[in-house]
């Protein structure tokens, strides 16, 4: 992916502090920008464990010692993008001195407040481009005077067509990649479907036709179509919240687009639970323990900041 980026955007520089084998044209370990007479040092560090599979043929060097070396470059402000898990990023920051700001790159989500660890401000703002981190920096106090997350309002920014084309080409390429991965798994499809305790909405409809009809008018019935529109209908990052039975609490439902095509969308069993037993004995109690946490596994602070259990339940109730 990095080399394809380089090919398409030849004038850009990719920063990677602990990539072995540099210099490679177009890649640099760090950069120093002079802004208002202040030297701002920027680098990016990758966790070697995290990227073992992703970076073919490239070696990643020890993060701590390489970062220490880079910080010897004269600067007034040092910023590092860390491609680490949350825990490991914190561990690295505790062991290093002289880093002013660390931006957590891989972890999805947004931190409301930046956090001070060992003299370094840790921020996380990975929200699919929906927000931008904003920082006013006091060079004397070595601390932010104003730090906030700004919502990106589409109306305010005109898309750079060249970049937009690059992104959409990349999305198409990525979708094709996931489709290929999917195809290579096809041999196991039958044994996968056999184990699923979800019976799908088709079965519910036979006994609860009115409720099924009302469900079809909710956004939950369009969740998969929304992914298709964005070219993300095979993307493992997106699927769990747009299908049935695939969230962390219960991975027994949706497996993949070809293995479980009956489990697209947020169907009945996402809220009520697998109905394998219910359809055998409908008179027994089933599936009415629905509380805020049933919803907030998907309607999170990031995906739906305005979510309110009481109000939103009215919109999908039957
Ligand atoms: C498995 C993930 C998931 C769960 C669990 C979930 N939702 Fe949703 N919900 C979604 C997605 C995804 C959408 C957006 C669908 C779209 O438009 O693509 C959505 C949309 C909605 C909407 C807008 C619906 C409309 O008709 O416009 C409401 C309201 C809503 N959900 C309420 C709830 C409530 C209340 C719960 C819990 C009882 C809940 N959701 C549980 C994923 C989920
Ligand atoms: C943590 C759960 C979660 C994940 C992961 C997730 N979504 Fe959603 N998505 C939601 C919820 C909840 C809604 C409904 C939000 C609302 O009603 O405001 C939604 C709504 C949408 C919508 C319809 C509303 C809109 O904003 O246009 C689209 C399109 C969408 N998601 C695309 C994606 C894509 C693409 C990905 C992967 C990059 C993704 N989603 C990953 C939970 C999720
Ligand atoms: C977004 C979550 C959600 C989805 C999706 C959902 N339900 Fe429900 N359902 C609820 C809630 C909440 C209640 C009310 C529970 C209570 O009374 O405590 C309920 C109640 C029910 C009841 C019992 C009350 C009644 O009206 O008879 C049935 C039956 C039912 N749902 C069937 C279905 C079927 C069938 C589907 C799919 C077509 C479905 N539900 C989809 C949340 C959901
Ligand atoms: C064979 C017919 C049949 C099928 C199929 C069926 N149900 Fe039911 N369901 C019933 C009957 C009958 C009741 C009412 C039982 C009672 O109140 O005595 C019921 C009740 C329920 C209740 C309320 C349970 C309670 O504790 O009061 C929920 C929720 C529900 N069904 C959801 C579903 C969902 C979701 C599906 C599909 C996954 C489904 N049902 C499929 C016949 C069926």
Image: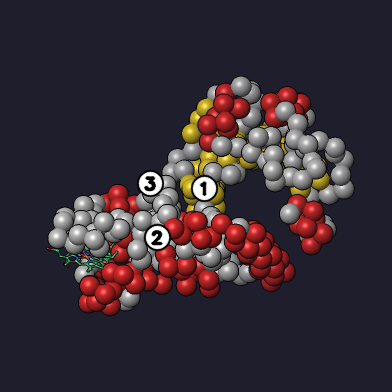
Q: Which residue is mark 1?
A: 108
Relative height, residue 147 to residue 176 (above, below): above
CA gap between label 3 and label 1 equals: 18 Å
Q: Which residue is mark 2?
A: 244
In primary-sequence order, the first of circles 1 and 2 is 1
**Is the CB–ligand 2 distance for label 1 below 8 Å?**
yes
Q: Residue at x 78, y 36 (%)?
A: 59
In primary-sequence order, the first of circles 3 and 1 is 1
**Is the CB–ligand 1 distance for label 2 below 8 Å?**
yes
Q: Position of residue 85 (x, y in %)?
A: 56, 37
The answer to the question of whether label 3 and label 1 lie on touching residues, with beta carbons closer than 8 A, is no
**Helix, strand or loop for disc 3:** loop
CA gap between label 3 and label 2 equals: 12 Å
**Helix, strand or loop for disc 1:** loop
Q: Quick one: label 1, few (<14), some, or many (20+) residues within 10 Å?
A: some
CA gap between label 1 and label 2 equals: 21 Å
User: In the rendered view, does 318 fall on the left or right side of 74?
Assistant: left
Q: Residue at x 21, y 52 (%)?
A: 289
Q: Position of residue 84 (x, y in %)?
A: 60, 37
Q: Quadrant of residue 315?
A: bottom left
- 1 vs 2, front mark: 2
Q: Quick one: label 3, few (<14), some, or many (20+) residues within 10 Å?
A: few
Q: Which mark is residue 189?
A: none
Q: Which residue is mark 3?
A: 249
In this rendering, does residue 156 appear at all? no
Relative height, residue 53 to residue 115 (above, below): below
In primary-sequence order, the first of circles 3 and 2 is 2
């Amino acid at each position: 992916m990095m080399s394809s980026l380089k090919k398409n955007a030849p004038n850009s520089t990719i920063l990677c502090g602990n990539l072995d084998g540099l210099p490679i044209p177009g890649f640099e370990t760090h950069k120093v920008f002079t802004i208002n007479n202040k030297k701002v040092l920027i680098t990016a560090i990758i966790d070697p464990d995290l990227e073992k599979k992703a970076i073919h043929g490239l070696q990643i060097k020890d993060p701590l010692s390489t970062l220490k070396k880079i910080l010897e470059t004269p600067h007034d402000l040092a910023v590092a993008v860390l491609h680490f898990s949350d825990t490991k990023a914190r561990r690295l920051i505790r062991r290093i001195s002289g880093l002013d700001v660390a931006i957590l790159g891989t972890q999805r989500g947004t931190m409301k407040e930046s956090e001070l660890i060992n003299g370094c401000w840790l921020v996380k703002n990975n929200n699919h481009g929906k927000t931008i981190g904003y920082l006013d920096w006091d060079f004397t106090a070595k601390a932010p005077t104003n730090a906030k997350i700004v919502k990106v309002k589409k109306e305010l920014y005109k898309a750079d067509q060249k970049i937009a084309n690059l992104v959409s080409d990349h999305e198409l390429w990525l979708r094709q990649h996931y489709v290929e991965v999917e195809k290579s798994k096809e041999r196991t499809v039958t044994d996968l479907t056999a184990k699923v305790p979800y019976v799908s909405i088709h079965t519910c409809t036979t006994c609860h036709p009115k409720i099924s009809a009302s469900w079809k008018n909710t956004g939950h019935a369009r969740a998969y179509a929304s992914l298709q529109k964005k070219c993300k209908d095979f993307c493992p990052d997106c699927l769990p919240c747009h299908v049935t039975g695939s969230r962390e609490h219960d991975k027994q439902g949706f497996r993949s687009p070809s293995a479980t095509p009956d489990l697209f969308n947020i169907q009945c069993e996402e809220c009520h639970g697998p109905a394998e037993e219910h359809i055998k004995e409908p008179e027994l109690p089933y599936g009415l323990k629905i509380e805020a946490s049933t919803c907030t596994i998907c309607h999170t602070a990031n995906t739906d900041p305005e979510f309110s259990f009481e109000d939103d339940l009215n919109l999908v109730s039957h």
